[in-house]
Image (tube, rainbow, N blue to C red):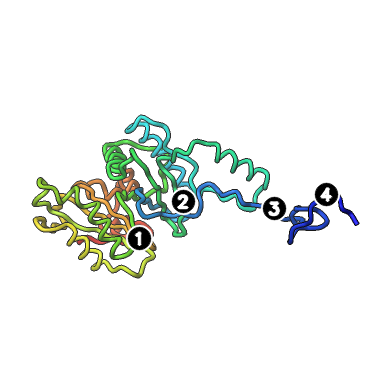
Amino acid sequence: MDTDPRKRKAEPGERQDGGSKRAKGKRNWDMPRRGGAESRAIQPGDTGIWATCAMKKEAKSVSDLRDLFQEYVIKLYGTTEANGTAADDSDSDGGDIEAEIKKELADIRKPTTKPLFTSLKLDTQCLMFFRTRSPVEPVSFVHKICQDIADGAQPRNLRYVKRLTPITATDKATPQGLEAVAKQVLAPHFHGSDQAGKKFAIRSSIRNNKEFSRDEVIKTVAAAVGPGHKVDLKGYDLLILVEIYKNVLGMSVVGSNFEKLKRFNIEELRHPPQTTVSEAKIGSKDPIESKEDV
């Protein structure tokens, strides 16, 4: 019998023929991936920009918009830190194991500063979302881009991009979430002592969500606007945009030149349609867009 005191008994579950060696062919992946599942989806509290594009041109449009946003970040904020690696732009699962480990280690060593823009992968065609962070303010940022194009600027490589929609705040797509976002977003525009007598309209878009009706959204948002203001669908001072996608909703307030700026439709600003009125009504809509004024 071996009584060497330097040896210890094997603990339960340990292999007798190899100490603590793992089973052949298995690897330990306890290292957390940087930017987990939550970073790949729109989250309550996010600010950002919705974008629509031509069918099956999402990847190209994301790349083109990154370049455009980078240009305007430098122009407006004097910084070049617009773009980091998007949380979902490439999925390396199933790739080279050693390369994956090196990438994880390199990412961990990088500064933790978040990019100003992060594109999030959606499972809906023609639709994209860019999460933003300070100092980017989505409404003024998108407005500047569209105003410049209306004034004659011709950004490169935006062949497939259609509409941009800024989002000031998001929450869960619940009645409580809608009330919370409305309170947050509308207060600076309607609730101040110098904000009385505003004319407003509401435009909603509901995608992949059967819990909300437009009437319900309109009623809640109009109530949040409060007294002292009136609805004016054509001559509004402010337009409230409500975007509901699956289980998240977002809201923003834009100015009276929204229609003049083609509802922030870059394609129409760059190439004003030279068609008849009836043809324009058919061809000017985004592939998945469904909106109406209230």
Badge 4 element = loop
Count of numbered badges drawn on the protein: 4
Task: Locate the N terminus and report the quarter of the image it occupies.
Answer: bottom right
Nearer-the-camera pick, 4 or 185:
4
Q: Amino acid at mark 4?
A: Pro
Of label 4 and label 1, which has the lower sequence position?
Answer: 4
Foreground: disc 3 or disc 1: 3
Q: CA distance from mark 2 to mark 3?
A: 25 Å
Which labelled disc corresponds to residue 32? none
Q: Residues within 10 Å of mark 1 (few under 14, many from 20)?
A: many
Nearer-the-camera pick, 225 or 159:
225
Res 75 quadrant in image: top left
- Residue 9 drawn at (x, y percent): 79, 56
Q: CA distance from mark 4 to mark 3?
A: 32 Å
User: Is residue 253 at all visible to an observer of this figure?
Assistant: yes
Asked whether, in this view, residue 157 is left or right of residue 189, the answer is right
Q: CA distance from mark 3 to mark 1?
A: 38 Å
Q: Residues within 10 Å of mark 3 (few under 14, many from 20)?
A: few
- Residue 81 drawn at (x, y percent): 42, 34
Q: Residue furthest top?
A: 78
Badge 1 element = strand
Please say if the residues under marks 2 and 3 sit with CB atoms less than 8 Å apart.
no
Badge 2 element = helix
Residue at the disc numbered 4: 5
Residue at the disc numbered 2: 39
Asked whether, in this view, residue 140 is left or right of residue 18, the answer is left
Residue at the disc numbered 3: 27
- Residue 186 drawn at (x, y percent): 21, 52
Q: Residues within 10 Å of mark 2 (few under 14, many from 20)?
A: some
Residue at the disc numbered 1: 172
Q: Residue at x 67, y 47 (%)?
A: 96
